[in-house]
Amino acid sequence: MAAIESSPAPAGNLRRHALRFVLFIGVVSLFADMTHEGARGISGPFLGTLGASAAVVAIVAGLGELAGYVLRYAFGYMADRTRRYWPITIIGYTLQMAVVPLLAVAGSWQIAAVLLVGERTGRAMRNPSRDAMLAHATRELGRGWVFGVREALDAAGGMLGPLVVAAALYFHGDYRTGFAILAVPAVLTLVVLGAARWQYPNPSRLEVGIGVPQAAGFPRVFWIYLAGMALVAAAYADYPLIAYHFGQSGVIGTDAIPVLYAVAMATEAVAALVLGRLFDRIGLRTVVGATLLTAFFAPLVFLGNAPLAVLGMVIWGLGMAAQESIVKAAVTGMVSSGRRASAYGFFDSGFGIFWFLGSVALGLLYGVSIFALVAFSVVLQLAAVPLLALTAREVTRTRPQTAS
């Protein structure tokens, strides 16, 4: 390892180190998602057992998600200004992984609520710095593939975590046991993260060659892209609302609702790899095509029978894969390496704000008319397509500057 940190390594060596670093971060994501997605699946009913009302559960979830997105720009900007990417990443993961097992000993819903918001805050802290370090491997391996692999492992953890908790509940029937058992993947997250930091203390050594020129602000193409993805964010329904619909309509049996979420996560894992490869071949046209396809998940999920609802959830999972992999890969090529954490953080903050506003709108529309909800979702996603297509043209026009 000394060679990679002290001086540039031969090309083959550099590619091997880049691959190892991506896999390290991918395994960290797998264990981290096992932890927080496992907790997410039972946090609502757990708050209910502590005396929280449905309104409190919704507010806590909403505040947590809002904090988890809005704070990303602040932490990303901090990382770029201080160049302390590893310390910020480690602190964020440590906060996130520590609070989940602590839910097992929470004595009131107020304490549990603070811990749940803390978990989202830790996620906001670590994501921009982690992704900025991960981006250094993209020159050797391809932007789509790097972020696709990370997201595939992340989604695998998101599928395994709820299943682990479900098994714990089946054998013990207690939410506190479920939170406590998540201490195992939480510890594994920090162990693998520590190993990655020890092996690759300076991931920027993985990136050689000419990058995007340094600029004072974000380029025009970044803003066009963010506008398009903001429309997608506002149109995309959260799984809790989808699950609520399944429960109310009876289209999907109660026991099958969490299983269907696992199916969506499995789809996300596979789709992230496929979309990543496609992105490295045809660029942002992959995002355009994915958006055209996922625009129609809403009518399948909210208006279809059981088979159509399952198909809709598969498409929904594909859309989630796109948002967490190739969407981030595109941002990587728009800004210089010294501003990536800020760009990721700002992009995620904007995306998250529109996701929150859209979720509120979708929730209100559900109470008025499911047809109105479906129309809102489809129209906004289709409206995003011209902006994404314009982004693809802008990137193609400036390809010599933005290629990785």
Image (cartoon, helix red, strand yellow):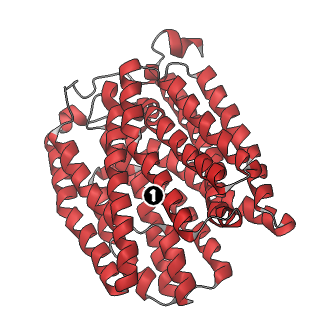
Question: Which residue position is annotated with label 1?
Answer: 321
Quadrant for residue 292, please give it. bottom left
Q: Is residue 33 visible?
A: no
Along the viewing direction, whichever of 248 and 290 lies nearer the viewer: 248
Reply above or below: 281 against 143: below
Q: Quadrant of the N terminus?
A: top right
Reply above or below: 159 against 141: below
Q: Residue at x 40, y 73 (%)?
A: 363
Along the viewing direction, whichever of 301 and 173 lies nearer the viewer: 173
Q: Is residue 138 visible?
A: yes
For the residue marked with disc 1, what is the amino acid?
Ala
Q: Residue at x 58, y 45 (%)?
A: 119
Label 1 packing within 10 angstroms: few (<14), some (14-19), many (20+): many
Residue 50 pos. (x, y %)? 70, 62
Residue 314 pos. (x, y %)? 49, 72
Horizontal side of 364 relative to 168 (left or right) equals left
